Amino acid sequence: MRIGILNSGGDCPGLNAVIHGVVGAAAKLGWEVIGFRDGFEGLLPPGDYQKLDPEDTVGILKLGGTILGTTNKSHFAAKIGVSDPVEAIEAVTVKAKRTMEQLEIRALIVVGGEGSLSTALHLYQAGFPIIGVPKTIDNDLQATAMTFGFDSAVSCVVDALDRLHTTAVSHKRVMVVEVMGRHAGWIALWGGIAGGANVILMPEIPFSLEKVAEHIKAREAKGHHSTMIVVAEGATIPGGQLVTKEAHEGEVRLGGIGELIATEIADRTGKETRTCTLGHLQRGGEPTSLDRILGARFGVKAVKLAEEGNFGRMVSYQAYHVSSVPIEEAVNHLRSVDPEGEVVETARAIGICMGD
Ligand code: F6P
């Protein structure tokens, strides 16, 4: 039997651990594994792929990125010359079927985030033997309690905060650190707590810049002359709060949310303020041990599902156990931070200002 695997969407530490798990478990069953390169693009005829034997995966467990490469939806849409993403999925389905048949692929493991899993679901509904593996550093998929890559991203934030604390203290500055999280504040919350942030701002909790400024002034009064603010990239400033935007138009480059907050806070507190956007640093580098283990477990479970003929399902981590759910559950169901939840409560209890 021959099975295929591809990664799709943004890369994520732990992807190679999944490949390692898939190849190892498949070899035990005497199966052959074909790794498609650059996401769904690898499925386009004549197919861009490589055979993956256990020897090919030696040493990859600890590598960041993915040995197979990955692309996002707009990339493959452009590649096949279709601008509409829905039409692109239709087109890829037809073309991919030929590749699957020619190579006699009996199961296709798709490792991807919400967008890629919706493509995977479409393929499954078109008759492909699909198994999904969830992937996102943002940890915002409802259908799994945790995704690999998240812990590595949080570690990156913590490392950055540890470094930024010392320079912030030396200069008595406010440091605004913008972290990833388009829809949810998981990285900001976990990274902020573990890295000793004083303020955490995220999409789930509407915040007031005045409250943040008051918090900074109160810290000043107590002799704490530096403040570390962590903000998720998806956080938005509730309307009517911007006093500086107009005043600084043309003078200040209003970039991401971090830069905007830094400008506003400087105006309200008179404090020297700096911004640091961590960006793709959070997606690069070696996976943590937790992400290596989770990735490997997800890969092994995906092969198990293939062995059982359990297609249309996605591997899922629930209560210390790797199980599976229908892929539908992962699509259009994002998981936000609960503003009343225990982790936010913990942040508040240890004195972190959530800006509200
Ligand atoms: O979904 C993960 C994520 O890391 C987001 O937090 C971020 O906005 C996005 O990917 C960046 O994607 P790209 O690599 O396409 O710029």
Image (cartoon, grey):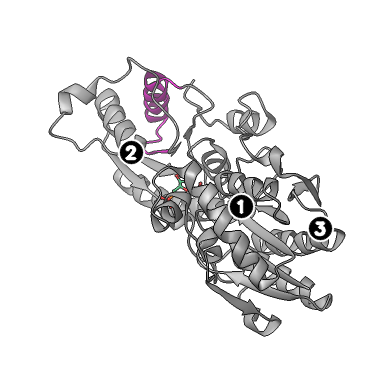
> Farthest residue toward the top?
240
- Vertical relation: 94 (above or below) 189: below
**Residue at label 1?**
135
Which span of residues is magenta-colored?
207-229
Q: Which amino acid type is marked by label 3?
A: Leu
Q: Earlier in the sequence, mark 3 or mark 1?
A: 1
Q: Is residue 14 visible?
A: no
Q: Nearer the viewer, residue 133 or 166?
A: 133
54 vs 37, left or right, is right
Q: Is label 2 within 8 A of ligand 1 (CB to nearest ligand atom)?
A: no
Whether residue 167 is in magenta: the answer is no
Judging from the image, what secondary structure is the residue with disc 1 in? loop
Mark 3 / mark 2, whichever is N-terminal: 2
Furthest toward the bottom, the residue is: 55
Residue shown at the point (84%, 63%) measured from the top left: 307
Q: Position of residue 222 (x, y in %)?
A: 42, 29
Residue at 35 percent of width and 35 percent of height = 257
Residue identified by numbered label 3 = 305
Q: Nearer the viewer, residue 18 or 212?
A: 18
Confirm or reject: label 3 Cβ below 8 Å from ligand 1: no
